[in-house]
Amino acid sequence: MARQADFIAPSILSADFARLGEEVDNVLASGADIVHFDVMDNHYVPNLTIGPLVCDALRSHGVTADIDVHLMVKPVDRIIPDFAKAGATYITFHPEASEHVDRTLGMIRELGCKSGLVFNPATPLSILEYVMDKVDMILLMSVNPGFGGQSFIPSSLTKLAQARKMIDESGYDIRLEIDGGVKANNIREIKEAGADTFVAGSAIFGAKDDNDEHVYNTIINEFRSELAAANV
Ligand code: DX5
Ligand code: ZN
């Protein structure tokens, strides 16, 4: 199966929350493909962010792009229907946060969303073996979840290659997403290792010109040209 088209997915964790709708409009107008929506509960991860109300508010604001909800919450099952109702496109969760991973994946699809599993840096991919037919997205964390602005963990490249091999051998149409420390100077090798969906928070929302103005189009264009230069 051919590799899916590259998706650039700004993580709104690094956006200005006081102007969230405008920030999302701006990154999409600057060429981003999907919106990465980080949900943290101060329990599964040591930080607290946003929930279904904010996802719903972005839809009411007029956002039509895919919303990629990354759940860093435990447990997960109770909140999933709320996100489906709030307009989530993808819903991904960490297997450690669900007692019944197969059931949770099934529930996400039954609610009409695309399902995905998220792997922390030290979590093995082995659990995937039995659920490849139930996932639309595999998300590899290249930092420990909880905060933006951390450094990319290099062993994630080896893991990406392993996940890419599993996807290709399965024949299923599954996206391979990377999340954490993605920058213009490493996105090319990340694509070469196998990713097709690239989350970037601080790199995109923190990009500024000499006058301290945000330049989302400049950084997204830079990502695109690095991706185009990848040897895949
Ligand atoms: C971390 C989140 C990431 C985060 C990435 O737990 O899942 O999506 O926002 O931020 P950067 O791109 O700054 O590493
Ligand atoms: Zn994330």
Image (tube, rainbow, N blue to C red):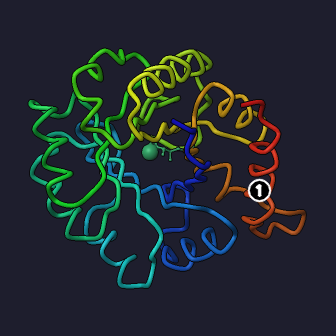
Disc tally is 1
Give how far across and how far down residue 192 sits, in percent: 69, 28
Mark 1 CB within 8 Å of ligand 1: no
Q: Is residue 76 above or below residue 123?
A: below
User: What residue is shown with label 1?
Assistant: 219
Instruction: Answer left or right for 201 relative to 53.
Output: right
Q: Residue sitting at 74 percent across and 35 percent down? A: 188
Dividing the picture into quadrants, the one containing residue 61 is bottom left
Give how far across and how far down residue 125 sits, in percent: 36, 18
Q: Residue sitting at 34 percent across and 61 percent down? A: 89
Q: Residue sitting at 79 percent across and 70 percent down? A: 213
Quarter of the image where the C terminus is located: top right
Question: Along the line of sight, which residue is nearer the eye, 206 or 194?
Answer: 194
Q: Is residue 203 above or below residue 21?
A: above
* Amino acid type at image mark 1: Ile
Counting other residues with Cα less than 10 Å from the Cα at mark 1, is it few (<14), some (14-19), or many (20 or more)? many
Instruction: Answer left or right for 220 relative to 130.
Output: right
Q: Residue sitting at 40 percent across and 76 percent down? A: 58
Residue placed furthest toward the bottom: 61
Residue placed furthest toward the right: 210
Question: Along the line of sight, which residue is nearer the eye, 43 or 78?
Answer: 78
Instruction: Answer left or right for 214 relative to 132.
Output: right
Question: Along the line of sight, which residue is nearer the eye, 1 or 75?
Answer: 1
Q: Is residue 152 above or below residue 5?
A: above
Mark 1 element type: helix
Give how far across and how far down residue 2 sits, in percent: 56, 38
